[in-house]
Image: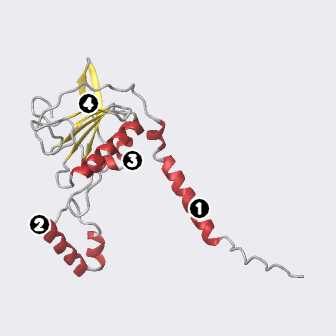
């Protein structure tokens, strides 16, 4: 949103959280077993107090900020999208120079919030892009392109979770380039999954060795 209040860019979250942002298998159950669908929705409403009907976005958007007489492209990651590697990798391929991660993790607890922060470190290393992480209940901070936490917001009570405060810091940008990992579209992982499946099939269908012959006594 610019200074006049006009919307100049928009991004829709691509990875929705099951049962809190959408109901899994809802259309399938409605088509084949409507009673089960109604029961499923009833259980979701009992658990959350509502039935979610979120629609996931279908593409990454790169935004731009005025910077040094030009523009600074960046990609936004929402909630746990940073845990799904193809989403930030797509932002890197589209030319983002940094990630802005906005998230709400207040109900998952401190240990999981710390783990989600560590996932940000991994994503930064994969794409060699720095992070600005803004969690409305923590943990907020700045991460450089080598996966190092440069600064963390500590609130008025000195805490990093559920402690209000403001953090201002400088962010060191990497040269505009796309890493081999971002260009590969998870080729490394897919290669190992394929190799694992091949070994599994081979182990299932390879001929079993017969029993060892008994020693012959003379």
Q: Earlier in the sequence, mark 1 or mark 3?
A: 3
10 Å crowding of disc 3: few (<14), some (14-19), many (20+): some
User: Residue 143 appears in which quarter of the rendering?
Assistant: top left
Place of residue 14 in the rendered image (x, y in percent of width and height, measured from the top left) = 29, 51
Secondary structure beneath label 2:
loop
Which of discs 4 and 2 lies nearer the camera? The answer is 2
Secondary structure beneath label 4:
strand
Cα–Cα gap, marks 3 and 4? 21 Å
Q: Is residue 202 visible?
A: yes
10 Å crowding of disc 4: few (<14), some (14-19), many (20+): some
Q: Is residue 13 visible?
A: no
Image coloring type: secondary structure
* Residue depicted at x 69% and y 73%: 207
Place of residue 6 in the rendered image (x, y in percent of width and height, measured from the top left) = 13, 34
Judging by the rendered image, the residue that carries numbered circle 4 is: 64
Judging by the rendered image, the residue that carries numbered circle 3 is: 86
Q: Up-down: is 2 above or below 208?
A: above
Residue 49, labelled with which disc?
Answer: 2
Question: Circles 4 and 1: CB distance less than 8 Å?
Answer: no
Q: Residue furthest top?
A: 69
Place of residue 87 in the rendered image (x, y in percent of width and height, measured from the top left) = 35, 46
Residue 93, labelled with which disc?
Answer: none
Question: Circles 3 and 4: CB distance less than 8 Å?
Answer: no
Q: Up-down: is 95 above or below 42?
A: above
Which of discs 1 and 3 lies nearer the camera? The answer is 1
- The C terminus - image quarter: bottom right
Which of discs 4 and 1 lies nearer the camera? The answer is 1
Secondary structure beneath label 1:
helix
- The N terminus - image quarter: top left
Q: Earlier in the sequence, mark 3 or mark 4?
A: 4
């Amino acid at each position: 949103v610019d200074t006049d209040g006009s919307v100049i860019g928009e991004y829709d979250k691509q990875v929705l959280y099951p049962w809190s942002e959408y109901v899994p298998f809802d259309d399938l159950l409605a088509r084949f077993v409507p009673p089960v669908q109604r029961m499923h929705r009833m259980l979701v409403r009992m658990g959350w107090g509502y039935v979610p009907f979120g629609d996931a976005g279908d593409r990454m958007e790169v935004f731009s900020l005025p910077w040094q007489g030009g523009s600074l492209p960046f990609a936004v990651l929402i909630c746990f999208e940073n845990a799904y590697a193809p989403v930030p990798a797509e932002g890197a391929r589209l030319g983002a120079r940094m990630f802005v991660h906005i998230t709400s993790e207040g109900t998952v607890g401190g240990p999981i919030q710390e783990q989600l922060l560590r996932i940000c470190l991994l994503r930064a290393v994969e794409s060699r892009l720095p992070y600005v992480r803004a969690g409305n209940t923590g943990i907020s901070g700045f991460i450089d392109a080598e996966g190092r936490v440069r600064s963390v917001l500590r609130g008025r009570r000195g805490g990093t979770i559920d402690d209000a405060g403001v953090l201002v810091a400088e962010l060191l940008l990497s040269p505009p380039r796309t890493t081999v990992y971002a260009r590969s579209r998870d080729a490394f992982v897919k290669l190992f999954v394929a190799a694992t499946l091949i070994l599994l099939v081979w182990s299932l269908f390879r001929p079993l060795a017969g029993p060892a012959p008994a020693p012959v006594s003379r």
